[in-house]
Every structure is written in C-alpha cells, then in structure tokens.
Image (cartoon, rainbow, N blue to C red):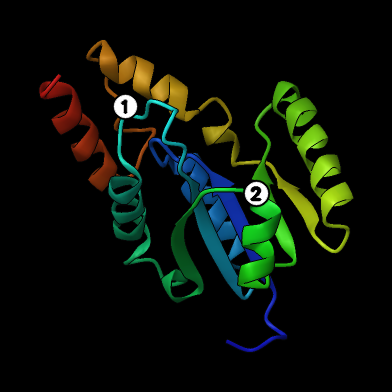
Amino acid sequence: MSDDLKIALYPGSFDPFTNGHLDLVQRASKIFDRVIITIAVNSKKETLFTGEEREQQILNAVKDQPWSSQIVVEQFTGLLIDFAAKKKASVLLRGVRQISDFEYEFQMALTNRRLSPELDTVFMMPDENHAITSSSIVKEVAKWGGDVSSFVPPNIHTKILEKYKSK
C-alpha cells in the first residue's frame, strides 16, 4: 500500500450495519482511496452479533459494489488513534444524523485531535432517507417483530431474522 493513499477509518460498532452506514461508505469511497470500516469490539458490551459476524456481514454487503476494492473491514480494540496510526489513516470518518449526534462526535473529535494532532475527523451526513436509522432502532424494531428490511442491506436483514428467531 502506497504511503500517499488517502486512508479514512470509519469506526463504529455496526451492530448491525445499516443502509445509512452503507451510504456513508459509498460516498466516502469517492473522496478517499481506501476506507477501513473499523469494527469496535468491546468484550464487556452486549451485542446482537459477534465481531466476526459483523465483519462478514459488512464484507458481504459491500462485495458487489463497484467501489468494493477500496473497502477494508477490520476489528479493533484499544485506542482508535493507535489503530489509525498503525493503518496510516489520516482521517476518521463519522456519520452525523442529527444535532444530538454532533455534540458527542464533536467531543470525540476534539479528544482525538488532542491525542493525535495529525488525525483529522470528517463528518458526513447520511442521505435523508437514512437520517432516522440507527443500529439501536433497527434492533428494537426487529426484537418486536417489526419489518427492518428497508433499514439494512438484504444479507444483514436475513441474519437479523435468523438471530431473533433463535432468541
């Protein structure tokens, strides 16, 4: 990998990966040479899917896209700035759906900047069709048998249905 590539990390739990996430990755692929979808794995946090399951689901969701060769999916633990340095990323990509998201993201961006001044944060807004979508809402609706097919890629919708049938 060339050192002059513009590499962005897109960190999150992605539990599950939504169409809003997919929208941001697609648009980021037009700006950056490589987008590393960075799955935060926290053994103390209860998730619907394991880190490995989320990684495979995201890979399957992007594999047929024309920009898929620019996408890497990896799990990480620890400080994001350390992972960014290891991957030679110069940018953290963050999605902001609403003002309430921005307040938290702004604090995180300033903290990351203090810890790693060479690492910038880029905020992107999702397509308005995905502005209400969050992983938490998807899980809550699915838990009660609601149709979440319009919120997530088809392969992930199948996995959500399987997961809730087994609970």
Instruction: Judge depth for marks 2 and 1 and give the one in front.
Output: 2
Which of the two residues, 70 or 15, is positioned nearer the viewer here?
15
Classify mark 2: helix, strand or loop: loop
The disc label shown at residue 148, or none: 1
Residue located 25% across and 37% down the image = 157
Q: Quadrant of the C terminus?
A: top left
Vertical side of 119 occupied by 20: above or below: above
Q: In this view, does 61 lie to the left or right of 135?
A: left
Residue 74: x %, y % from top left:
45, 60
Q: Which residue is drawn at 44% across and 20% down?
A: 137
Q: Which residue is drawn at 29% across and 32% down?
A: 149
Q: Quadrant of residue 49?
A: top left
Image height check: is 134 above or below 55? above
Q: Is residue 89 left or right of residue 155?
A: right
Front-most of residues 40 and 124: 40
Marker disc for residue 79: 2
Residue type of the residue flagged with mark 2: Leu
Q: Is residue 71 above or below residue 136?
A: below
Q: Does residue 31 appear in the picture of this structure?
A: no
Neighbours of disc 1 within 10 Å: few (<14), some (14-19), many (20+) = many
